[in-house]
Amino acid sequence: MPARRWRKLAILHKIEATEGVDAAPAAADAIVATNVSFSPIEAEEVRRDLILPYLGNQGMLLAAEYGRMEFDVEIAGAGAAGDVPKYGSLLRVCGLAETVSAGVSVTYSIVEDGVESGSIHFNSDGVRHVFLGARANVAMSFAPSRIPHFRFTMMGVKGTVADVALPTVSQAGWTTPVIASSVNTAMTLHGSSAVTESLEIDLGNTVTPRFLIGAEHMQIADRQSTGTAVIEGRHVADFDLFGKIAARDRGALSLVHGTAAGNIVEIDAPAVEFGRPSQGESDGFVTYSVPLALCPVAGLDELTITVR
């Protein structure tokens, strides 16, 4: 048989009705991704270390087997305001609840109880790997003259591996993104319109494999939401970055990407603290790379994603 090609990939993902029971995703559940990294088996190696009257490797057993994959998905709308984006199921297994306001928007907000799980079918040119009970973390990046992306890191309990033909995948329902720019993207930080080289936000989920007697699952054990903004250096009178750092001020971050209804994605964080900045330069102009801590106000509210 011919050698398999790396670029012939299909990722199918669907929310599970029962955690760990294959939701049987089909071609309609395909994820259009890029920059894929895939580890088919992560496991603990348990060595036997038998005492015998001769030397040699006695082999080992694999325990707590799961799979891990990372990939990017373009940040774009759903095609019409109030429609659910095709990547919505991925955000849901990151501990984000999906709330649909018909004809208006779809909002993803943090939950800690009852986090949904998903089934992943990863087909690499005719070999299908199944992972169950998957949960994930998401990060996002925005940079001028680039397509913004979500970066998903997913982990699921290892299921079957078998020869299965690649599914027929369509890009129907996936919206063409727009480039991040001053025309398409608006950002405010602590009430100021920020001239930004880049923004990165990480939901900060710690996804932990839990392999116990009677239960095997992926759990979101912790969450520390962070980010980094590279902003153009301005005078203190324009934006007192160092005064805000000294005072440990918290302020809002809002980024709206896209201008046409059906292709707008908004990121909101109500209470952002600045960390220790580092000074740099871009094209001969001063910049500051500023760490961000996204803090909750009343709880479960440090980050929301709205598609409209």
Image (cartoon, rainbow, N blue to C red):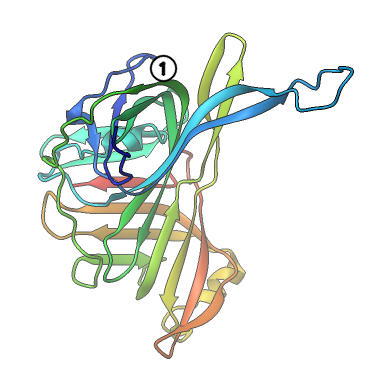
Residues 282 and 58: in front is 58
Compared to 19, does 103 lie above or below? below
Give residue 39's position: percent from left, percent from top: 48, 38
Q: Out of 57 and 263, give the one closest to the viewer.
A: 57
Q: Residue at x 21, y 25 (%)?
A: 26
Q: Residue furthest bottom?
A: 284
The amino acid sitting under disc 1 is Glu
x, y percent for residue 25: 26, 23
Q: Is residue 247 above or below residue 42?
A: below
The answer, for residue 98, to whether it is visible in the render is: yes
Residue 20, quarter of picture: top left
Residue 28 in the image, given as x and y percentages of width and height: 17, 30
Viewed as shown, does residue 54 lie left or right of 141? right
In the rendered image, which quarter is residue 168 located in?
Answer: top left
- Residue that badge 1 annotates: 19
The quadrant of the rendering that contains the N terminus is top left
Asked if residue 153 shows in the view, the reply is no
Q: Which residue sits at x=24%, y=70%? A: 181
Is residue 237 placed above or below 115 in the rendered structure?
below
Residue 4 spot, x, y in % from top left: 32, 39
Neighbourhood count class around disc 1 (C-alpha, 10 Å): few under 14, some 14–19, many 20 upward: some
Circle 1 SS class: loop
Q: Is residue 55 left or right of residue 303?
A: right
